[in-house]
Amino acid sequence: MSETQSEHWTVLITGGGAGLGEAMARRFAADGWTPIIADLDEGRARAVAEDIGGDALALTMDVTREADWQRVAGEILERFGSLDVLINNAGVAVGGTLEETSVEDWRWVLDIDLMGVVLGCKTFAPRMRERKSGHIINVASFAGFAAAPGINAYGTAKAGVIAMSEMLRAELADSGVEVSVLCPAFVKTRLTETMRAPDDSYQKRVERWMANSGVSAEDVAEVVYRAVEKPQFMLLTHGNTRWMHRMRRWMPETYFGLVLRGARRAMARKSSKS
């Protein structure tokens, strides 16, 4: 993509006011793209857009509201004429087993992490199909295929994002529209600020794993940017998740054994502290 061409390319990033979304907005802007930073928190979105400068645009939206998606689409069409890349990044986390997680929390995480992505795709996929151009990147998680216990609702929501993205990819295959699904493991973000769980031990473990992951939000943003330059569907950002993904596909019982051993060790630690 030439420098002149990239000046006119637009990318909408939901949850772009902090963490991974902010890192992606900055990475695209660094190469001349116009980032549209959408966030539930108006102040965060505006702060990122103002710091990036140029044509960067801040929009306030709730990804669970279809009316907000239509409003955002209208604003983008009016200001820029079209959208080139949609990154469905906004999300929340829930910790706990199926029995520990309330129905309310199940609905909360599914509504934001899965249905928020569905609404984004339904809003922009037809427009991209009509233009015969565009790229949709749905942010799932390693949790979506890890089948790890203790994050049942969150993992189910992210698994739904992966499955929906696979089907959408096939549906758009001949349209000129690319689809990718991003499945990072632990990255230091602000996800635990809104995380719901039976007790604070879940947040503490996640924060510890984030701090020790060795992969930054900027590293993940680079993977996403490269996938737009050279389209790729499954985006795995952590080395260990690549071999775990292969093992789960090719040796499912061996993989389940690893998951089970890890779950038993976690239960033993939890019992010893209670």
Image (cartoon, rainbow, N blue to C red):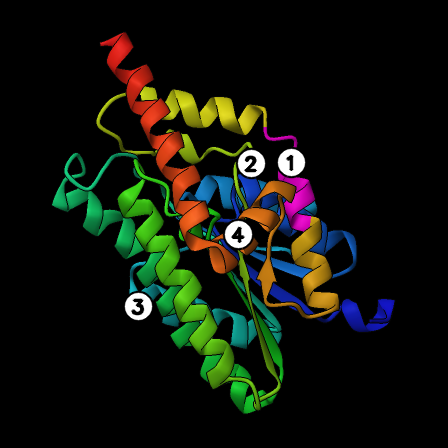
Task: Residue under label 3, please give it.
Answer: 67
Residue in the image at 68% along x and 63% along y? 227
The mark lying in front, picked from 2 and 4, is 4
Q: Which of marks 2 and 1 is nearer the N terminus?
A: 2
Task: Residue under label 2, please give it.
Answer: 187
Task: Residue under label 1, please give it.
Answer: 215
Which amino acid is tagged 1? Val
- Please tell me how crowded label 1 is: few (under 14), some (14-19), or many (20+) other residues with Cα within 10 Å: some
Expressed as whole percent of the image width and height from the top left, the position of residue 17 reads: 52, 44
- Cα separation, mark 3 vs mark 1, equals 36 Å
Residue in the image at 53% along x and 76% along y? 78
- Cα separation, mark 1 vs mark 4, equals 22 Å
Task: Residue under label 4, please give it.
Answer: 247
Reply above or below: 18 against 59: above
Which amino acid is tagged 4? Met
Contact between labelled residues 4 and 3, with CB atoms less than 8 Å apart = no
